[in-house]
């Protein structure tokens, strides 16, 4: 009997191990929240990881050597069975973990090699899905060991990029496995200096205090000859606590050696049987102890001996895992009961959902979803904080990136900080209002583009009845052209931005429906049609609204009504008077020379002075006639663009442009509110209702009833299997707990 245990004691122990093995399989298959204690082996590729696992098992089954030999974690549920003269192995099915197939070691080896080859050819060369093997053998300990892919330490050079990608993938996989709090981490280090922490660096990212970590120094037989002094051996066997940076399980590291050579009948094989391999392990252990005592010049203490060799490590792990198993039994039962209640509830819900798959219920579901969807939509437009802003809100910068920005003719954007609430993450009506406020701010601050002398001259043209110039017509031609080119892009930008905001309401409504339990899960066909109908309505409504706005813009830029475009003559007079003080400013007067403008100004000033000094009773009439002649000369009879004519054109263009801008801004905001926002509130319900009535004529295809029924039936079957396994496992753990409690209660004092 193993360790002096009776057959009865061993059977009790086996029951615990089998229960935890089933629990581990259940957790892996159904991703349930409980975890069974297990030993997780972590090490680098050259640390002798797979060789150590084989030595613990007492037989060889995997590839051992340089490079990546493990691309999927291998879970070994090992059971000590003195009646098994050779390993009895069962490979758990990948597709159905309830099925196990007995296989030879060679078949399991071939399966692992095939999986490695398959993954090696895939983009992601590693998989976190475990290969599960159950083993019974006379040399096996009662352990569950998970062998992980070996960590890789690639060179930092650029040519090692492929290896660096693999190293990152392996480290992520191993870290994810170490996150399970129930796992005992077996950390392998192949070094003779404990200050070098190759594997511990990765382990301590998850277990910084090493509180659930057992450290093992592998390849002891190669390290002993490296020590020149006994003091070096002392430090190696009993490293200072500060060197290991934590409180490791077992208080100090373990030291192991595994003899090289494979088991088999080929000429390259060193051992003919697993018995020979097992004896070689024991012999290697005795030689290591002898070599250490020789180096130290003394016999090893009992505590030191308990840390040397595979047998010591195996005994420690088995006792540790058994203690964890027994202590966890009372904690596992409530988790299983909770999972049992959850699975039962899921089965009942599936039964109810299957019973609801009829025409009347589907129609009612569709109508109810329609009403609830519109309620949530209205709530978002009116204002709500039910949806988390950090998940669904957008800052102004995000909104510009996703929905487009307001960009003027110069291609520049206003800094977001100038817009109120720019940094806040908004959605719904608040986001709509901010976008409209930005539109008013940007368009309201837009100035008339620069007018050149060439544009003025080209706009003059030739009249159909005389060859004079009509500068009021010239100003109108320039103003409407500039206004059309400036404001039309803003119209498209506003439409795109508001459409983006309205389309964003759909996923937020879905979130609110899911939160309130009103979401139609597993009815993707119906939901896709509702989504399509909503997006189609929003797009067509935005397009129609934009066309109405374009009609207004075309009308205000096709014909100038002075009552609309020039709101007050006092403003125009003030505008013209402002040019008197800046008659010599070249930037205002366009392309004419400064000398010409100054001479003209001086002549006009001198003429005014002479007329004022010699004015008689007829002076007023003469002055009026002179000014009228000058005006006609400059604006009608003379093709030469005088400064006064240029100022008049410039002033008229500015005034007309400003009138168009004010009208465009007010009209666009009003129309988008009336013909885009309001239809979402008052016309969308009717539109969705029409679509819903069309759906009702073909409910089977809309709801995909046949496919849904098949999917629900399959889910119910899977859930019933899970429920049955949970119930069986719960009863098994209750029985174990009762036996343990009975033994503790009646133990003699």
Image (tube, helix red, strand yellow):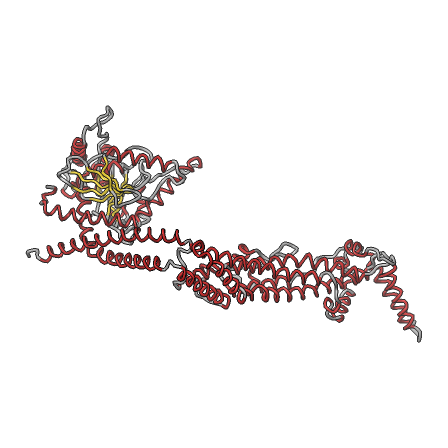
Residue at the (34%, 42%) spot, across then down: 127
Q: In which quarter of the image is residue 385?
A: bottom left
Q: Quadrant of residue 573?
A: bottom right
Residue at the (73%, 65%) spot, across then down: 655
Q: Quadrant of the N terminus?
A: top left
Q: Where is residue 451 in the image (x, y as percent from the top left)?
A: 74, 57
Q: In which quarter of the image is residue 581?
A: bottom right
Q: Which of the pair 653/372 is nearer the observer?
A: 372
Q: Where is residue 329 in the image (x, y as percent from the top left)?
A: 19, 54
Q: In which quarter of the image is the C terminus?
A: bottom left
Q: Where is residue 284 in the image (x, y as percent from the top left)?
A: 18, 33
Task: Answer with left or right where residue 12 lies relative to residue 96.
Answer: left
Task: Answer with left or right where residue 641 lies relative to residue 742.
Answer: right
Task: Answer with left or right where residue 659 lies relative to residue 518.
Answer: right
Q: How many marks?
A: 0
Is any atom of residue 320 visible in this view? no
Q: Where is residue 30 in the image (x, y as percent from the top left)?
A: 30, 50
Q: Which of the pair 20/570 is nearer the observer?
A: 20
Q: Which of the pair 698/240 is nearer the observer?
A: 698
Is any atom of residue 96 visible in this view? yes
Judged from this view, the residue extending furthest toward the left is 748
Q: Is residue 74 above or below residue 455?
A: above
């Amino acid at each position: 009997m193993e360790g002096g245990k009776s057959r009865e004691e061993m059977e009790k122990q086996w029951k615990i191990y089998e229960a935890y093995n089933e629990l581990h399989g259940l957790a892996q298959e159904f991703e349930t929240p409980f975890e069974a204690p297990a030993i997780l082996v972590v090490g680098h590729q050259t640390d002798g990881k797979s060789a150590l696992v084989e030595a613990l098992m007492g037989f060889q089954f995997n590839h051992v050597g340089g490079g990546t030999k493990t691309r999927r974690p291998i879970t070994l549920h090992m059971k000590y069975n003195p009646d098994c003269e050779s390993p009895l192995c069962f490979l758990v099915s990948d597709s159905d973990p309830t099925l196990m197939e007995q296989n030879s070691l060679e078949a399991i080896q071939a399966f692992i090699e095939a999986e490695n080859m398959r993954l090696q050819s895939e983009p992601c060369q590693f998989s976190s899905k475990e290969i599960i093997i159950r083993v019974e053998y006379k040399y096996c300990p009662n352990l569950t060991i998970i062998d992980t892919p070996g960590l890789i330490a690639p060179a930092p050079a650029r040519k090692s990029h492929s290896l660096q990608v693999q190293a990152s993938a392996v480290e992520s996989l191993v870290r994810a496995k170490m996150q399970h709090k129930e796992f005992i981490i077996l950390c392998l280090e192949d070094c003779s200096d404990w200050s070098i922490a190759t594997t511990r660096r990765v382990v301590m990212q998850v277990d910084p205090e090493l509180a659930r970590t057992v450290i093992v120094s592998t390849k002891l037989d190669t390290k002993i000859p490296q020590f020149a002094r006994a003091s070096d051996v002392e430090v190696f066997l009993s490293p200072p606590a500060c060197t290991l940076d934590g409180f490791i399980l077992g208080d100090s590291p373990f030291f192991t050696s595994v003899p090289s050579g494979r088991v088999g009948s080929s000429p390259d094989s060193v051992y003919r049987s697993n018995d020979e391999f097992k004896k070689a392990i024991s012999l290697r252990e005795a030689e290591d102890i002898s070599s250490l005592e020789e180096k130290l010049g003394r016999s090893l203490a009992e505590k030191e001996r308990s840390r040397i060799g595979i047998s010591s490590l195996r005994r420690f792990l088995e006792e540790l895992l058994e203690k964890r198993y027994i202590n966890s039994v009372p904690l596992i039962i409530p988790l299983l009961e909770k999972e049992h209640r959850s699975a039962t509830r899921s089965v009942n819900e599936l039964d109810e959902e299957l019973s609801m798959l009829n025409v009347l219920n589907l129609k009612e579901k569709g109508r109810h979803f329609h009403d609830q969807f519109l309620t949530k939509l209205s709530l978002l437009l009116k204002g709500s904080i039910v949806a988390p802003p950090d998940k669904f809100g957008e800052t102004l910068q995000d909104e510009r990136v996703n929905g487009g920005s307001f960009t003027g003719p110069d291609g520049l954007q206003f800094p977001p900080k100038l817009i109120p609430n720019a940094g806040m993450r908004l959605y719904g009506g608040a986001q709509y209002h901010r976008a409209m406020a930005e539109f008013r701010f940007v368009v309201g601050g837009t100035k008339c583009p620069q007018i050149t002398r060439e544009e003025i001259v080209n706009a003059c043209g030739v009249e159909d009845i005389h060859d004079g110039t009509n500068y009021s017509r010239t100003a109108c031609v320039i103003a409407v052209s500039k206004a059309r080119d400036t404001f039309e892009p803003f119209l498209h930008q506003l439409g795109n931005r508001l459409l983006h905001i309205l389309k964003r309401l759909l996923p937020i409504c879905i979130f609110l429906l899911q939160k309130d339990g009103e979401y139609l899960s597993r009815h993707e066909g119906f939901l896709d049609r509702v989504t399509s109908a909503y997006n189609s309505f929003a797009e067509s409504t935005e397009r129609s609204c934009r066309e109405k706005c374009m009609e207004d813009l075309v009308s205000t830029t096709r014909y100038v009504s002075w009552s609309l475009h020039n709101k007050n003559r006092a403003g125009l007079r003030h505008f013209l008077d402002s040019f008197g003080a800046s008659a010599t400013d070249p930037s205002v007067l366009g392309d004419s020379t400064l000398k010409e403008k100054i001479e003209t100004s001086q002549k006009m000033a001198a003429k005014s002075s002479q007329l004022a000094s010699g004015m008689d009773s007829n002076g007023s009439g003469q002055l009026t006639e002179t000014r009228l002649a000058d005006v006609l000369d400059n604006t009608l009879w003379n093709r030469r663009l005088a400064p006064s004519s240029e100022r008049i054109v410039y002033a008229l263009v500015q005034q007309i442009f400003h009138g168009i801008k004010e009208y465009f801004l007010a009209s666009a905001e009003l129309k988008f509110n009336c013909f885009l926002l309001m239809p979402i509130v008052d016309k969308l319900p009717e539109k969705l209702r029409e679509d819903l009535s069309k759906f009702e004529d073909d409910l089977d295809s809309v709801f995909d009833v046949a496919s849904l029924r098949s999917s629900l039936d399959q889910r119910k079957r899977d859930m019933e299997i899970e429920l049955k396994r949970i119930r069986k496992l719960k009863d098994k753990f209750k029985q174990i707990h009762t036996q343990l409690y009975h033994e503790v209660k009646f133990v003699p004092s």
